[in-house]
Image: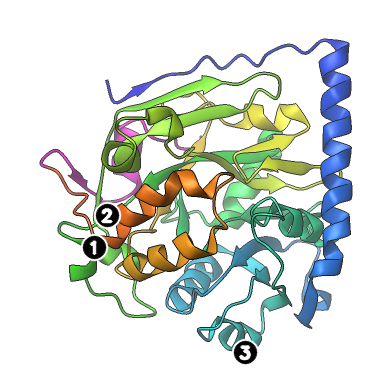
Amino acid sequence: MAYQPVAAEMPRLGWREAYRMRWKRRRLLWQSWRSRHQLRRLSNRTANISTEDILAFVVLRNEANRLPYFLEYYRRLGIGHFLVVDNGSDDGSTEFLLQQQDVSLWWTESGYRASRFGVDWLTYLLMTFGHNHWCLSVDTDELLTYGGIETHDLRALTALLDRQGRAGLGAMMLDLYPNGPLNRQSYTAGQNPVEVLKWFDPGPYRAVRQIPMGNLWLQGGARERVFFAEEPRRSPTLNKIPLIRWHRRYAYANSTHSALPPPLNALYDGPGGAQPSGVLLHTKFLPEIVQKSATEKQRRQHFHTPAEFDAYYDQLTASPDLWRENSIEFTGPEQLIDLGLMRAPDW
């Protein structure tokens, strides 16, 4: 079996746990509000946002190669405005973003890890500009796909979710990788990264619900197989809730893996689940990852306990080959539906 289906039932909270979750959400919102002092506005085009716009929220650093395709992909999909925090880029990302008329840009050199890996900045922008908008929160190496994407853009998808009374769409993050060592590939800015990263692991994946928030914990796949086979519990969390009709009282708790209030976590029940869901095509393994891994090992900004992940960065710096004989070549969203990795909306 490629995955282990998770029970869809959410844990029932007693009044003490519900009280604790309420105060945790308030603390996170206050922490995020205070983080606004770390942000310097470089371009503010938010006056151009219309009430019906779907908004994208992004935190990035040194993504000049990815940005041209990333922006074009989501423009085609229906994003009306991008709200971006640049965490100290020095590769031309800042200058490129300043030229984009549908981008509002903030700058900070504050610590990424200290900001809950950018979530405080993200939440501040969401509460300030995202209220009552459909909001997509993604990294520049994540391309959202879903059943029917060829004929239904995000405007059609969110209209359907509104009609069904759904507050959001959950998604699995699916690692894509090339056939061969990472540094032997080539990628040009503006190119579709899926043309380089054509392969993925169909399984195994496993998921459990966590208490008390009821958030899913989905793991498995290529990164676990290659980098965390001996300690699978340390492998990356693959579930996200990237698309939400936002309310200023909402807060992401752990990246976009979980959110508060807890009912938001019921939006996603994982591979094989009954609810409509998507997949975030994770294009992390472009050839630049080899050099970037050496840099990030020194910066120590991407994990709660950075020293414990030195071996992970060392393996990436050595340019591994993630491909194996039972890797599957990606052909499109229908394939992911057939494999049970996502469920198409009921158009």
> Residue 248's spot in the image, x, y percent?
85, 48
Observer-nearest of 338 and 105 = 105
10 Å crowding of disc 3: few (<14), some (14-19), many (20+): few
Q: Quadrant of residue 194?
A: bottom left
Choose the circle earlier in sequence order: 3 or 2.
Answer: 3
Q: Check if mark 1's residue and mark 2's residue have beta carbons within 8 Å.
A: yes
Observer-nearest of 226 and 189 = 226
Q: Nearer the viewer, mark 3 or mark 2?
A: 2
Residue at which label 3 appears: 99
Residue 1 appears in the rendering? yes
10 Å crowding of disc 2: few (<14), some (14-19), many (20+): many
Label 3: element kind:
loop
Q: What residue range appears in magenta?
A: 325-345
Prevailing secondary structure of the magenta residues: loop
Mark 3 is on which residue type? Gln
Q: Nearer the viewer, mark 3 or mark 1?
A: 1
Choose the circle earlier in sequence order: 1 or 2.
Answer: 2
